[in-house]
Image (tube, grey):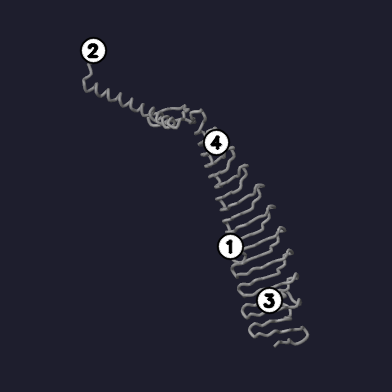
């Protein structure tokens, strides 16, 4: 006797299993087909080699090309990078998976914007490819460079300071958050010519030799004028409206003899001599 013939129920069950297998295969093919249709809508073609499974498409490299045959998008699985090209086929945007970078290129192929996640650096470049602005996340700094690559501006988050440099790279202005030294202006020789301290409200002006010549004192509401030997020669006092002129016998902290005093509180003028008693008028 031959094999038992299949019942109607068994035939239906076998047909259902075949349909399920065919459906899974069509899902894998449909995934790639859908990808190709999306690219084709933009007038691009897909270059693809790889395995197709019912649930995924696996490959190492994918190229999308336009109707002219130019590669517009490239995906590289070997290093996790993605390139987006212009109509001439030149890269305009690159995403680097290996270092977490984003690079934007101009039409000449020069990198004008670069963000590196590996070291938290953002570079903005000019048309020559030279960095003009750099932000560093690791130390909270922002630098601006001239076309020669010299730093002209520095914002440093570590101490809250701002520094401006000349073309030779020397600090000319420094603004920072320390209590007694908030603003420095220097000459080309690196000498401080003006110093402002917001804590006491003092402003000091120096000569090219580094000597203090004028001091404006906020706490004492006064102004001091010094000679090149750092000796106080003239002082103005806001608390009593007086003006005092000194000789050069002493230094800064211990002033010399008062030679002329204009006393605003009394309206008198005093004339003094080291060897005689003071004379007042009126």
Determine which quarter of the picture holds residue 200.
bottom right
Quickly name the residue at label 1: 177
Q: Would you say the residues marked 2 and 3 are in contact, meaning their CB atoms lie under 8 Å apart?
A: no
Label 1 sits on a secondary structure element that is loop
**Mark-to-mark CA distance, 1 and 3:** 29 Å
Q: Residue at x 25, y 24 (%)?
A: 13
Determine which quarter of the picture holds residue 231.
bottom right
Quickly name the residue at label 3: 235
Other residues around mark 2 within 10 Å, as few (<14) / some (14–19) / many (≥20): few
Which of the two marks, 2 or 4, is nearer to us in this view? 4
Q: Is residue 155 left or right of residue 170?
A: left
Other residues around mark 1 within 10 Å, as few (<14) / some (14–19) / many (≥20): some
Which of the two marks, 2 or 3, is nearer to us in this view? 3
Label 2 sits on a secondary structure element that is loop
Q: Nearer the viewer, residue 84 or 264?
A: 264
**Image quadrant for the N terminus?**
top left
**Image quadrant for the C terminus?**
bottom right
Please tell me which of labels 4 and 3 falls first in the chain. 4
Please tell me which of labels 2 and 3 falls first in the chain. 2
Q: Residue at x 24, y 23 (%)?
A: 12
Q: Where residue 198 appears, x then y in whole percent?
A: 59, 67
Q: Residue at x 72, y 58 (%)?
A: 189
Label 4 sits on a secondary structure element that is strand
Image disc number at residue 2: 2
Q: Where residue 33 appears, x then y in whole percent?
A: 40, 28
Other residues around mark 3 within 10 Å, as few (<14) / some (14–19) / many (≥20): many
Quickly name the residue at label 4: 91
Relative to 206, is 42 above or below? above
**Mark-to-mark CA distance, 2 and 4:** 70 Å
**Mark-to-mark CA distance, 1 and 2:** 101 Å
């Amino acid at each position: 006797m031959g094999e038992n013939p299949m019942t109607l129920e068994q035939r239906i069950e076998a047909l259902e299993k075949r349909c399920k297998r065919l459906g899974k295969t069509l899902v894998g093919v449909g995934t790639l087909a859908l990808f190709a249709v999306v690219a084709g809508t933009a007038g691009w073609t897909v270059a693809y080699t790889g395995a197709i499974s019912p649930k995924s498409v696996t490959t190492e490299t994918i190229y999308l090309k336009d109707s002219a045959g130019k590669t517009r998008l490239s995906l590289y699985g070997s290093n996790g990078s993605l390139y987006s090209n212009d109509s001439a086929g030149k890269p305009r945007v690159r995403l680097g998976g290996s270092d977490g970078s984003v690079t934007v290129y101009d039409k000449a192929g020069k990198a004008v914007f670069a963000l590196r996640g590996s070291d938290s650096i953002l570079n903005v470049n000019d048309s020559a490819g030279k960095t003009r602005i750099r932000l560093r996340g690791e130390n909270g700094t922002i630098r601006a460079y001239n076309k020669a690559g010299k730093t002209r501006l520095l914002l440093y988050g570590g101490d809250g300071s701002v520094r401006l440099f000349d073309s030779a790279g020397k600090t000319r202005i420094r603004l920072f958050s320390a209590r007694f030294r908030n603003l420095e202006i220097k000459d080309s020789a690196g000498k401080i010519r003006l110093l402002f301290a917001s804590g006491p409200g003092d402003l000091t002006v120096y000569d090219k030799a580094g000597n203090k010549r004028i001091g404006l004192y906020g706490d004492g509401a006064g102004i001091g004028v010094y000679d090149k030997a750092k000796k106080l020669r003239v002082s103005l006092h806001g608390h009593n409206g007086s003006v005092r002129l000194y000789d050069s016998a002493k230094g800064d902290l211990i002033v010399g003899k008062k030679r002329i005093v204009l006393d605003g509180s009394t309206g008198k003028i005093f004339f003094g001599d080291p060897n005689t008693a003071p004379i007042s008028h009126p």
